């Protein structure tokens, strides 16, 4: 039996998310999630600096899914979603966590992991330079991504990207990303 | 030259580029999934404006949010302005940011360091 993606992700999310979603990641869904989370933060009277950061990071996380997810494996229970992804947003003491999960062809792991490792070993100054370099030199890919999403997330949060790749079957893995946005960064 | 005016939406900014006054404004949120589709007409319009610009062009950028895919398109807009400036025309960018929004200030400084056009960073109260 393949590894249980739903179970794995919901356990990591921990059961008290302010928003939890699994399914197709399209433009409409992105609007709805952004609106819902923004409204909760305004109601929760979050300071505007944190609110803006969470919003920005959420935009990049959701659009990373939108632009980059690989199609779900054929034996996976959700076959109707063209771009299957999972999202959980948790309010924690002094900040927020944004968790995302999606399938990735195992052959694509190397490139993504290399990128994350590079970001995670870079200082804030190096990340800023990397951001400016990519901004100025890399064109928008055919998938529509600018190659800047993760760099921007790391720059804005000032935190390391926590992640894992879990093998699903011979062809696919499940990519989990956990982004911490703390109040005082 | 006809001005280009686009109303804002929750994901795309309000645009007012007025070639007769030389005042260009970008305001609001710029977070579309497909930013090239939105910005291409602006870049094309600027390409035409570049042929006969006013002696002075003022660009006001008042963005609340923008995504990384817009950031590349905004750079393309600035590159057109840089070409106008390089051809000995006066170009000035006013980059507005809310007082506690250091991320938006930094974003303006990124462009300022890449683009050879005078930038003014203007703090506004929330």
Image (spheres, grey):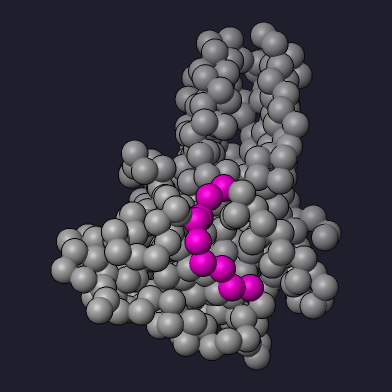
Task: Depth check: give the residue in front, A91 or A33.
Answer: A33
Left or right of A146: which side holds B122?
right
Q: Is residue A180 magenta?
A: no
Horizontal relation, residue A82 to residue B70: left or right: left
Q: Is residue A149 visible?
A: no
Q: Position of residue A178 (x, y in %)?
A: 45, 77
Could you tell me what secondary structure mostly forms the magenta stretch?
Answer: strand
Q: Which quadrant: the N terminus of chain B? A: top right
Q: Quadrant of residue A103?
A: bottom left
Q: Position of residue A80 (x, y in %)?
A: 44, 53
Residue at the spot 59% in from the left edge and 73% down from the top edge: A20
Q: Nearer the viewer, residue B25 or A164?
A: A164
Residue at image position (40%, 56%) is A79
Tell me: A102 left or right of B94. left
Work out whether A154 lies above or below A24: below
What segment carries the magenta color? A19-27
Residue A26 sits inside the magenta stretch: yes
Left or right of residue B43, residue B105 in this image = right
For residue A108, say whether it is visible: yes
Q: Looking at this view, is B95 or A181 the one in front?
A: A181
Please tell me which residue is depicted at 38% across the width and 76% down the height of the picture: A5
Vertical comparison of A120 with A85: above or below: below
Q: Position of residue B121 (x, y in %)?
A: 67, 51
Residue in view at x 42 percent, y 70 percent: A101
């Amino acid at each position: 039996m393949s590894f249980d993606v739903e179970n794995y992700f919901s356990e990591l999310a921990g059961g008290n998310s302010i928003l939890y979603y699994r399914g197709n990641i399209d433009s409409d869904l992105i609007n709805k999630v952004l609106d819902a989370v923004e409204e909760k933060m305004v109601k929760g009277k979050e300071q505007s600096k944190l609110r803006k950061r969470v919003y920005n990071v959420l935009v990049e996380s959701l659009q990373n899914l939108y632009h980059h997810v690989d199609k779900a494996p054929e034996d996976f229970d959700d076959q109707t979603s063209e771009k299957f992804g999972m999202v959980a947003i948790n309010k924690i003491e002094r900040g927020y966590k944004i968790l995302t999960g999606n399938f990735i062809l195992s052959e694509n792991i190397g490139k993504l992991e290399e990128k994350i490792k590079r970001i995670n070993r870079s200082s804030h100054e190096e990340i800023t330079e990397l951001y400016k370099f990519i901004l100025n030199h890399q064109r928008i890919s055919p998938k529509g991504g600018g190659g800047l999403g993760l760099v921007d997330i790391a720059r804005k949060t000032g935190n390391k990207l926590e992640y894992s790749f879990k093998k699903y079957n011979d062809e696919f893995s499940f990519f989990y990303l956990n982004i911490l946005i703390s109040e005082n960064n | 030259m006809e001005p280009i005016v686009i109303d804002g939406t929750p994901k795309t900014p309000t645009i007012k580029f007025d070639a007769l006054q030389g005042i260009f404004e970008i305001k609001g949120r710029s977070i579309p999934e497909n930013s090239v589709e939105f910005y291409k007409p602006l870049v094309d319009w600027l390409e035409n404006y570049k042929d006969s610009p006013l002696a002075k062009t003022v660009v006001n950028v008042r963005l609340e949010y923008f995504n990384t895919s817009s950031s590349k398109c905004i750079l393309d807009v600035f590159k057109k302005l840089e070409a106008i400036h390089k051809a000995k025309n006066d170009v000035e960018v006013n980059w507005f940011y809310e007082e506690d929004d250091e991320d938006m200030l930094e974003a303006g400084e990124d462009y300022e360091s890449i683009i050879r056009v005078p930038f003014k960073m203007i703090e506004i109260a929330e």
